[in-house]
Image (cartoon, grey):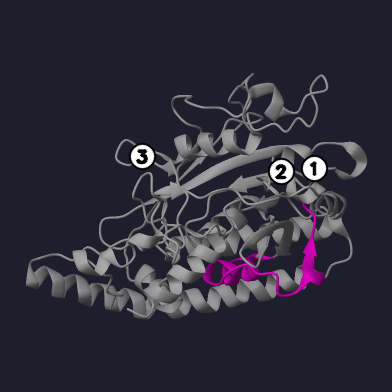
Amino acid sequence: LLPLLPQAADSMEKFRSFEDPASGIMPFMPEKVVRPKNILLKVFRGLIGLCLGLVKFPVCAILFLLFILVRSIFELLPIAFLRRPMIRIVDVVCCRLLLLLLGFWWIPAGYPKKKTVTVSRAGAKQTGWPPLKSASSGSILLSTLCSYVDVLYLCFRFSPVFVFPVQDKGKSVGKVLRTGPLGAIRLIVGFPSIADRRGLESISHVVANSKSSLSGPVVLFPEGVSSNGQGILPFLAPVGPVEEGSGPDQNGLEQQAWMGGKVPDCYALTIRYSSKHFSPIYTVQSFFSHAFGLCAQLYNSMEVTCLEERATELKAVDQGLTPSQRDGSSWSDRLRTAMCAAASSPAKSVRAVTPRAGVSNMGTAQALTAIEVKRLFSAQFNKR
């Protein structure tokens, strides 16, 4: 019922060219499926999983299509203060039902129990419940990305606008692609590209539009693609700066020219999954086999950790100095470190990773974005 993953040492060895050299982590390698050794237990679980999958998979598919259809209808309402609450109702009801059907009965969400790293030097108090309740239209919400299930949770909590960094010829361009829940899932299963420049926008324009149209917070996935949660990939522009870039969209969020001159509120969260048999994490597997395998589970686990509210505050200027000059490190680097700390658990430490894209004839790794590295990894993985 579940996709077989390469487990032998020789099978894993051919993917080593895509690992992070410092840690040895392969961020796009799917989690292994753990099968019981007892043949009777294996058959019993297989039959239970088959029954659950055959029942829940079509129900989830129908509910998801209904969710997209009803949501699309309400998005056509011309009056913003009527459109927003109707979309919230649809998102809360449909997405929570989908999460329940997928086995996420209870989703704990909160702040780190112990403050380890903050992006803001001043820090902030952990106030307000539920976490990140202040995230509203016109604010930015940065999130890790491990699965298409992330989209369902974020819709349930925030009903946001989703934006993805895009790349051109293996390099980040600083523009983003705005989309809804269906488009976000398609981009997670596929790869954000620059196929249509007419659909690309600056992050400042998306934030201004979100605020004026009451479209909800702007969820930006700074890594650009999903990974297996063992590490956090480099942040692409417009979150992280591009070394050779000089345009306003390539200087990072801290140096954006925001419309109206007001810097938006910025928040961040991490989503972590734990599993014993089948992982909800999705990287490069077959989408339908993974979705069926997810439906075949009786219970799945998700945990959301939010960085302290306002600890990710954007400050474009402070006494004539940028945050990078003031603190000695870029805002995006400190944010990445903070998100690694928030995503870590006693059982697993999450690190900042930079995967390679294979080795060239000259013996040096190619300098490509994580989007292109994952594309190359997916092509090799699915040919095995």
Residue 338 on image: x %, y %: 52, 34
**Number of residues whose C-alpha sits closer than 10 Å to that of mark 3, classed few (under 14), some (14–19) or many (20 or more):** some
Q: Are marks 2 and 3 in contact (CB under 8 Å)?
A: no
Q: Earlier in the sequence, mark 1 or mark 3?
A: 1
Q: Residue at x 61, y 26 (%)?
A: 127
Which element type, helix, strand or loop, lies under badge 3? loop
Q: Amino acid at mark 1?
A: Gln
The residue wearing badge 2 is 252
Q: Is residue 44 visible?
A: yes
Q: Nearer the viewer, mark 2 or mark 3?
A: 2
Determine whether 160 is above or below 348 in the image. below
Asked if residue 154 lies left or right of residue 8, the reply is right
On-image quarter of the C terminus: bottom left
Q: Tell me the tag on residue 349.
A: 3
**Number of residues whose C-alpha sits closer than 10 Å to that of mark 1, classed few (under 14), some (14–19) or many (20 or more):** many
The residue wearing badge 1 is 256
Determine whether 244 is above or below 78 in the image. above
Identify the magenta region.
Answer: 180-203
Q: Amino acid at mark 3?
A: Ser
Which element type, helix, strand or loop, lies under badge 2? loop
